[in-house]
Structure formats: C-alpha cells, structure tokens
C-alpha cells in the first residue's frame, strides 16, 4: 500500500527548499502523532464553553482539583463553536501535544472515532468503577460505534416547542403544544389571525442554521426517516410526505424560515418556534410575554443533540485514566446539575433529577422541566445527518430547496443518491 | 512575465558601484557581486519566512490534492487525478465559480472606482474632510467577523436597518438570507462597505505623492477637468491602479469571515459559497481534506494565471 | 515652494458649483458609511430587550453603558488587549522592516532572477490561510511554540503585500533624484534612509496602517495557536461573549467590537496627518 502518513505528507520530513528548518522540526517529537508528550498529571480540557459556561466549568474544575490534589486541569478556549473545537483538534492531530479531554458535538465525534483518534471509553470506565447505567440511555448511546462508547454526554440538548401564551390565548387555543403536526395545521389559521399580518404562526431555522436537525422530528412524525442504519431513506413515502407538509406550510404562509427565529419569537413576531433547550434562558430573558414550552409535536420523535466529552486515542494510558476520571467528574449527577442549571442544557444522569437542588429548581422553572420530561421520548439521530460527513449541510441545502418550492420527490431522490455516494466513498471501507 | 518590465525605473547601479562598508573601493565586477550579496541579504529573511510558512504548506497541499485524505485520518491514499476529474465534473463547481466571479468582479470594480472617487473628493480642500476620511477608513478597521455580526442588524428581514428604511417609503424588504441572489448581493455589499477604506487610502497616498508640476502644467494648458483626469491623473495613478487591481482581487477571492458569519455559504447550500469557502467546507465540514486541497490548488493556479495576465496587460500599457 | 503643495491643494479658484458637489458627495458618503457604524454603536448602548424590537429604536431608550462594563468584567478584556498590542506591534514592526528591505532589493538593486523572486513574493498572496494552517500547526507545535507569542508571530511575519506595495512605490520615484544621490556617493543604506524613504512617506504610512489593521484582526492562526488569555488576541477573546449554543446577547458583543476598533481608529487619525506631512518633507528634499 502506497500510503502517505500524516508525518510524511505534512512535509515534516523536509521538502526541497526548506529542508534545513523543517527537517529539524520533524525530529522534534517522538511518535507520529506527537500525542505521547505532555505532563501526565495535567489534564488539558479543550472546550468551547457551550452555553457561556466558562465560569461554571472553572468552578467544577476547582472542585475536581480539591478532590484530586495531585491533578491539575487546564481549561483551554478551544473555539467559539463545536466546529472550531473540531478544527483545532484536527490541527493538533497533525502534530504537537494533544488534549486530554475534548468537547465533541453530535456531528463531529464520529469522524474522529471512525479514524481511530478517540479512545473507546468502556474499559476505562469499568476500571474506574463508573456506573454507566446512570447516564440517560438515549444520550449515552448516541456515542456508540463498533460496540464501544466514544464520549460521555455533557452539554446535551433537544429541540423544544416554544409558544407565545398571549397569542395562544388570543387564538382561543388550549394552553399546550400541538399533539402532532396535523393538529398544528388545524391551529395554524387561528394562529395566523392572532399573530397578525407581516408576522408568522411558526418560524423555523433555515437550512444554514440546522433546519435539518428540527426537521427530523417532522420526518419521523410522518413515519419517515433520513436513514435506516447506513441506508438513506429520504425517498421513503413518509419522509417525502413530511417534505411536502413543510412545503405546504411555507406556501400557505404559515411558516417563515429565518437565520434567527428566536429573535423574532421573543419580539412577538412569531407565535411559536422550534428551538434548542439551550436557548431557554435567553428567550425567557428577551421575551416580553409569557413563554410556554411543550414537547415537539408527535410521540417519541424528538431528536437528541448537543455535545459530549471524549478522550483522544494517542495519549498515554496514564493520561487516559486521568482524563476519564475528570470526564466522569464533569458529568456526574452533582456537576451535571450545576452545569445545566447555569446553562439550560439537560442533566445527563438519571439520578440527577432526584437531587434536592434539582427538584426545587424544576419546581420553580416549569419550562426547564418540560425538556427533562421530554427526555424519555427522545430518539437518537439518523446516521445520514450525524454520522455521514457533511450530512447536516447536505440535508439543510435540500430543505432550503423544498422550502423554496422545488419538487420534493426529486430533491429527496437526489439527496438519497448523494448520501449513498458519500457513504460508499468515505465510510464503507472503514467500518 | 518579462524581466524588462520589472526593471522599469530601476537605477543603473553598477555604473557607480556603491562603496562597500569594509575593504577597498570595489571595482566594476566586484561591485556587481557586492550588489547581489546585498540583495540576497535584504531578501533572505522574508523569503525564508515565505518559503517555510507559505510555500511549504502549499507544496503539502498540492501533494494532498492527489490523495483521499480525511482531515482526521492518520494516513492518506493516493488517488491520482480523481479529485481533479471530480472537480471538473461536479454540478456545484459551476455555481461556486459563478459566485466567485460575480463577487470578485463586483468588489474589484466597485471598490476601486469608489475608492478613487472618494480619494479625489477628499484630496480637495473641503471643510470637515478629515472627519469623512476617518469615516471612510473606519469600517476597514473592524474585523470581518465583527462586521458580519453587525450587518445582521442591517439586513435582518425582521429588525434590520434596511427593512426599517424601506418600510418608511412603503417598500417591502427582500429576504436577504433566504434568496441566493439577494444573499450574494448582501455579502458583496458588506464586503465593499468594509474594504472601501483600503482602496481609498492607497489612492489617497498616491494622489498626495503625485507630481504637482504635471497638474500645474495641465492647469496652465487650460485642460478640461475630464481631459485632465484622463490624460494627467489616470496615467500618473497607473501603477497604483495596477497594484490595487491585483491586491483587491487576491483578497476578495479569499473572503471568508463575512460569508462564514452571515450566510455560512447558504442559502440552498451554496448560494454564497465561493472557492475559498468551498475549500473550508470540504476540508473541515465534509472532512474531505484531499478534495479541499484540490479546490485550493485549482484556485491557486487560476489566480496565478489571472495575475500574470494582469502584469502583461500592464506591461503593454507601459510600453505603449 | 510651489512644488510643495500639489495641484488640488493649490486650486483656490474652484468654482462654487464644484464646491457644492464636493460637499454633497461628502454628506452622501458619510451617510452610507456612518449609518451602519451608528447602528453598531447604538446597539452597544441598548438594553437587552431593546435590541430586537419592531419598529427599530434609532435612539436607545434608556441608554446604558452596562454592555461596556460587561465586556470588561465578563472576560479578561485587558489581557486580550495587551496580547493584541504585543502581537500587532511586533508583527507590524517586523513586517514594515522586512517589506521595505525586500522592496528596496527588488526595485533598486540589480541581480539575476529579480523578476522570478518578485513573482515568488506576490504569488504568496494567492495561498489562502485555510490551507496553510494545518501544515504550519504541525511544524510550530513540534517546536513547542503552542500558546506562545513567537508561535503566533513568526509564521505570520513573511511580507508579500507590503513588499509589493513598497516596490511599486520605489520604482516610481524619479530616477534623476536617485541617480544624483548615487553620484554624490550615497551608499545603499544612506540612499534608502535619506532619499528613498522620505520620498515614499505617504505610501509607507499607508502600508503601516494596513498592516496594523490586518494583524489586529487576524483570527484563524492566533485562534489555533493560543489556548487562553495568556496569548489570545482580542478577536479570539471577544468570541467568548457570544453564546455559542443558545441565544446571544448582542449588546456586549457590539460593545466589544467598538472597543476593539477604537485603538486602530485613533492610530489612523494620528497617521493620516503624517501622510500629509510626509509628502511635504519629501517634496522639500527634491
């Protein structure tokens, strides 16, 4: 096999013209990945501080260091979003010291796992005596590949149905979310009347802003899906039906697509939106009316989302053990409560909701409770979105086309073909 | 590129032979050697930096364009010219090239014309010109990412400034984010708004450094303003125009922050995707670093050709 | 002294029509440029609930400076500012020096392959940084320079743009003057320092200004290289104000933008006078 190794193709062995400088750089570190270096009792945690959580992360770190005086955790600002953390980690894979714990999102973790850059955590967790059964099953199993788990759930979210209670009342609707999308359709005329002209009954993020995440709920609701395992199923009658439903909503002026639906909603320009649970805090602060939250329309068809924490594969075993110790601490019942109360994410431990401070918190914040009550009704996302490279962007593009009136069956058939091709070219041989 | 043109205006150094700091006064032949070594000395640090930090990665990139490298993979398999074949055959290549072309031609043309106009305007003795000079330059100072964020408040279909202004005259605002044409207009406008300060400052510096005697001669001749502009001013600004046409083109082809913040290349997937954004998308989002490297290589070659053509055209003009 | 003031400055008998047109143009420009800037500034002075409202608020009611104190307290703003000043200062200095020296060699010295070397320099402008970062990261990280100033600065220090700009400028200096200086026995350094640079002052100032702006706003490379407020510059640090998975409060983000642009804007105000002064000095020499 005439393969190029990372070290070779990144020119570290020296290329003509710069041989002197690069050659000596190439010998600077032992081992190809360079991941072996680094102090074994300093844990480097690469985070984008999801939900403005830098302060609370630091707080948890302080608590960890108190419990483990021989260990130091260094919190690194690794990006302004999940994509940037992935970019920085990819750069680190090219050479130099690797982090010990890293935040990976629902769409970024898999490519690292597939290319053997993340450690399967099962054995490490077992030897550390962690009861993984306490993690919320749907959230923990999101990171399964090849019979291993490659991350622990950390800043996890789901979409929520947010509605404007004032407008709901004006439209003469019961104070609840729609049972399913057909019921929403029935309500939509009344909502249009209540919200007024130049405003919309529903606003959804557009294809550049994760419409592909929210639409999964609609696709599942009509019996379709993006894929079954690795087989794309956009042409499934259920998925196509959901696409047509979305298109009809757009044509009849019920829904508007927007880069920032939450801003319109808070200003009273949209009667309801689908948004991440992570937006709850912000929306509650911005809105001048009473905000209601409900499960997504339908039953048991709410996609999970958000991010977890993972451990790189090429660091030493000693560092891995420490990393897992910290990752577990970060996501234990106590800390997941601390973290989620500060940010609006969801507790990732089953036992967390029984802690007294969480019980009283949920009593005071019924909207936060909606998200947690919805948790048992969540479903792991389809491979075509989260595991296929570029899946989200690809589906988002097709949904933009659908929203703009292109033929649903044709758009989805093309999407099937494209997704299949990506799988064949980039995934198949590595499974 | 013809060496003769690049020597335009150069002094005939060897005739006098500048004295060396040490040793006896040089003779004709050693004077040339001395000049060569001085040139090497002056150029070396910069060239080393460029070679190590720009050209070495470029060479890596070209090598990777012949592989199937996944950005996270430890190894890459050679695939020959498959990526190039794919690039030429793919449907989105046309869209991306079209976007890049529209964006680049619009930004180069408009920002140079406006920059020159403004520089001429503010070169005159007008009250308050310092204030306006600063205002024109101010947007250039802000980072592209910040401008992208700020312009959401200009173009937002619900709250934006444009919507507010149009509503006052009873016109409905287009949805800049959902329609490809409008989205491309939006990022182009934003880019020009931000970078006008650049063409402006360069033209202003050139106007202030120009030779007053020519202006005065024209004035004495009683030439009309337009004739003066065409026959005296433009020829004097020719090197500046040439310089700007290359640098504005090269930087606008590489626009990234504004697109990334405002549209992420959308709507409908690639409504505002330009070549550089595609490089980013393929490399870091689709994880196909090999294909991303191919797009980058194609882009580099295209730019090289365009620049060489520009240099030639300039030469011809100079000789004519 | 008539050579000192250039044409436009000298025109005192401008027609009133032209003056009116001039002022109209200025007002128009001011509007197009200033209104979005004004928008950034007032957004930075608004309370959270007043940012997304319809109809839009042209004047914040009430105005608040809370966003500014938010910027300076929620993130280590002064640390980022210090890092920005260090990185921009060192980088700009070295780029100006390297750019002038390279341009001097490429315009006023004669040596074989000059055209090729020049092409090599400007072709560097065609390489987007998205493709150089991974490869450079590998190199710099192996040198152990991650999260250090030299790791951020050195890979960015090569000058293509400035070399091009200054070379263009040097080539357009009147040949007679340079010849005369050489005949007077001026060595290359003296020629550069006493003759070439003074005559190129406005362009040099423009070059410096553009360099400062570009380095001040550099994002991708410093982001990859830095880990925290010990080395991260402002553009990287300010992103901490955005909520990257939820609703962002734009007030502080706009306040950060305003604070970050102020130093460079002040520098421009100072330097634009220099551009004019430089011209005068250069012309006197001739």
Image (cartoon, coloured by chain):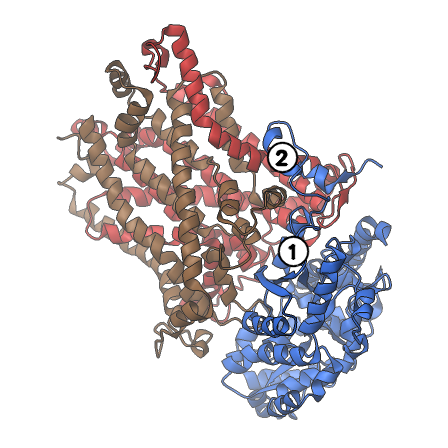
Chain colours: A blue, B red, C brown
Q: Is any part of residue C56 visible from this angle?
A: yes
Is C62 left, or right, of A102 in this rendering? left
Observer-nearest of C50 and C108: C108
Q: Quadrant of the C terminus of chain A?
A: bottom right
Mark seen at residue B145: none
Whether residue A112 is situated above or below residue C126 in the rendered picture: below
Going 39% across and 46% down the picture, which residue do you hit?
Answer: C89
Residue B267 spot, x, y in % from top left: 61, 59
In what element is the residue under mark 2? helix
The image shows residue B87 at horizontal and vertical percentages of: 71, 41
Quick check: do tags 1 and 2 share a chain?
A: yes
Is B113 left, or right, of B132 in this rendering?
Answer: right
Which residue lies at the image location 52% right of the left edge and 34% below the top edge? B50
Of callouts 1 and 2, which one flags the residue occurring earlier in the amino acid sequence?
Answer: 2
Distance in Å between CA atoms under marks 1 and 2: 23 Å
- In this figure, what is the number of numbered marks? 2
Residue in the foreground of this view, choosing between A173 and C157: C157
Q: Look at discs 1 and 2 and give the one toward the viewer.
A: 1
The residue at 17%/35% (across/down) is C5
Instruction: Answer with the quarter of the image where residue A164 lies.
Output: bottom right
Q: Is residue A331 above or below residue C96?
A: below
The residue indicated by pointer 1 is A39
How far from the left and from the top, in percent, is residue B139? 39, 54
- Tell me the residue at 23%/40% (across/down): C276
Quadrant in which the N terminus of chain A appears: top right
Snapshot quadrant of residue A402: bottom right
Q: Which residue is mark 2?
A: A24
B8 vs B285: above or below: above
Chain under numbered label 1: A
């Amino acid at each position: 096999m005439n393969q190029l190794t990372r070290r070779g193709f990144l020119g570290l062995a020296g290329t003509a013209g710069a041989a002197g400088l690069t050659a000596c750089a190439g010998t600077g570190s032992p081992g190809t990945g360079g991941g072996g270096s680094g102090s074994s009792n300093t844990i480097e945690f690469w985070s984008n501080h999801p939900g403005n959580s830098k302060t609370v992360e630091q707080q948890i770190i302080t608590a960890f260091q108190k419990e483990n005086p021989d260990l130091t955790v260094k919190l690194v600002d690794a990006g302004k979003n999940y994509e940037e953390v992935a970019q920085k980690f990819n750069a680190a894979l090219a050479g130099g010291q690797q982090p010990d714990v890293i935040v990976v999102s629902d769409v970024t973790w898999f490519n690292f796992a597939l290319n053997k850059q993340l450690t399967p955590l099962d054995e490490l967790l077992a030897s550390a005596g962690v009861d993984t059964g306490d993690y919320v099953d749907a959230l923990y199993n999101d990171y399964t590949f090849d019979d291993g788990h490659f991350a622990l759930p950390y800043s996890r979210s789901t979409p929520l149905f947010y509605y404007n209670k004032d407008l709901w009342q004006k439209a003469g609707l019961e104070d609840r979310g729609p049972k399913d999308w057909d019921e929403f359709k029935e309500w939509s005329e009344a909502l249009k009347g209540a919200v007024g002209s130049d405003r919309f009954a529903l606003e959804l993020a557009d294809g550049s802003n994760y419409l592909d995440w929210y639409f999964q709920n609609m696709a599942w609701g009509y019996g379709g899906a993006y894929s079954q395992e690795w087989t794309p199923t956009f042409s499934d009658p259920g998925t196509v039906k959901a696409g047509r439903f979305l298109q009809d909503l757009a044509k009849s002026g019920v829904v508007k697509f927007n880069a920032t639906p939450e801003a319109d909603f808070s200003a009273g320009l949209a009667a309801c939106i689908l948004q991440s649970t992570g937006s709850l805090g912000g929306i509650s602060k911005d809105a001048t009316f009473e905000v209601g939250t409900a499960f997504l329309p339908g039953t048991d068809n709410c996609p999970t989302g958000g991010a977890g924490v993972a451990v790189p594969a090429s660091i030493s075993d000693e560092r891995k053990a420490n990393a897992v110790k910290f990752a577990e601490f970060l996501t234990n019942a106590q800390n997941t409560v601390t973290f989620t109360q500060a940010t609006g994410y969801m507790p990732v431990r089953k036992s967390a909701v029984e802690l007294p401070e969480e019980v009283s918190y949920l009593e005071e914040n019924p909207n936060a409770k909606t998200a947690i009550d919805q948790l048992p009704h969540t479903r792991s996302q389809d491979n075509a979105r989260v595991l296929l490279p570029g899946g989200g962007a690809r589906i988002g593009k097709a949904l933009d086309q659908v929203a703009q009136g292109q033929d649903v069956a044709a758009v989805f058939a093309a999407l099937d073909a494209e997704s299949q091709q990506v799988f064949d070219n980039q995934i198949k041989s590595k499974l | 590129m013809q060496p003769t043109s690049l020597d335009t205006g150069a002094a005939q150094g060897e005739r006098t032979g500048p004295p060396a700091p040490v040793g006896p006064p040089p003779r004709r032949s050693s004077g040339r050697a001395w000049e060569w070594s001085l040139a090497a000395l002056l150029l070396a640090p910069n060239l080393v930096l460029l070679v190590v930090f720009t050209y070495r990665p470029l060479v890596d990139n070209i090598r990777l364009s012949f592989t199937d490298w996944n950005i996270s993979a430890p190894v890459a398999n050679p695939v020959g010219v498959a990526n190039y074949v794919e690039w030429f055959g793919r449907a989105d290549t046309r869209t991306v090239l079209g976007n890049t072309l529209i964006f680049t031609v619009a930004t180069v043309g408009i920002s140079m014309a406006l920059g020159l106009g403004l520089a001429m305007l503010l070169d005159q003795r007008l009250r308050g010109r310092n204030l306006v000079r600063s205002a024109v330059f101010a947007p250039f100072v802000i980072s592209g990412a910040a401008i992208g964020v700020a312009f959401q408040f200009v173009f937002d279909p619900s709250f934006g400034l444009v919507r507010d202004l149009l509503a006052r005259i009873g016109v409905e605002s287009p949805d800049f984010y959902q329609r490809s044409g409008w989205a491309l207009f939006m990022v182009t406008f934003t880019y020009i708004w931000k970078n006008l300060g650049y063409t402006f400052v360069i033209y202003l510096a050139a106007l202030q450094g120009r030779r007053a005697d020519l202006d005065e001669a024209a004035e004495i001749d009683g030439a009309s303003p337009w004739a003066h502009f065409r026959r005296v001013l433009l020829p004097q600004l020719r090197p500046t125009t040439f310089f700007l046409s290359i640098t504005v083109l090269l930087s606008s082809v590489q626009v990234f922050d504004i697109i990334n913040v405002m549209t992420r290349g959308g709507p409908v997937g690639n409504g505002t995707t330009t070549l550089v954004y595609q490089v980013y998308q393929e490399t870091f989002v689709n994880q196909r670093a090999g294909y991303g490297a191919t797009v980058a290589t194609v882009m580099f070659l295209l730019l090289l050709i365009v620049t060489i053509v520009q240099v030639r055209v300039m030469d011809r003009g100079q000789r004519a | 002294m008539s050579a000192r003031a250039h044409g436009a400055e000298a025109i005192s008998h401008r027609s009133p029509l032209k003056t009116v047109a001039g002022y109209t143009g200025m007002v128009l420009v001011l509007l197009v440029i200033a209104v979005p800037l004004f928008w950034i500034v007032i957004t930075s002075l608004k309370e959270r609930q007043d940012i997304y409202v319809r109809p839009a608020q042209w004047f914040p009611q009430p105005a608040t400076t809370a966003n500014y104190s938010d910027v300076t307290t929620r993130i280590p703003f002064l640390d980022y500012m210090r890092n920005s000043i260090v990185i921009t200062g060192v980088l700009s200095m070295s780029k100006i020096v390297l750019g002038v020296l390279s341009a001097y060699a490429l315009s006023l010295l004669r040596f074989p392959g000059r055209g090729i070397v020049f092409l090599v320099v400007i072709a560097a402008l065609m390489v987007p940084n998205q493709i150089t970062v991974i490869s450079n990261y590998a190199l710099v990280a192996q040198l152990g320079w991650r999260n250090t100033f030299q790791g951020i600065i050195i890979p960015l220090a090569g000058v293509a743009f400035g070399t091009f700009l200054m070379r263009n400028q040097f080539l357009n200096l009147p040949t007679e003057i340079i010849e005369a200086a050489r005949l007077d026995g001026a060595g290359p350094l003296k020629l550069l320092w006493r003759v070439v640079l003074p005559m190129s002052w406005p362009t040099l100032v423009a070059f410096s200004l553009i360099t400062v702006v570009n380095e001040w706003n550099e994002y991708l490379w410093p982001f990859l290289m830095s880990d925290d407020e010990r080395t991260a510059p402002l553009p990287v640090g300010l992103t901490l104000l955005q909520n990257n998975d939820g609703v962002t409060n734009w007030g502080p983000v706009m306040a950060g933008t305003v604070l970050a642009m102020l130093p460079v804007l002040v520098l421009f105000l100072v330097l634009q006078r220099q551009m004019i002064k430089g011209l005068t000095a250069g012309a006197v020499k001739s």
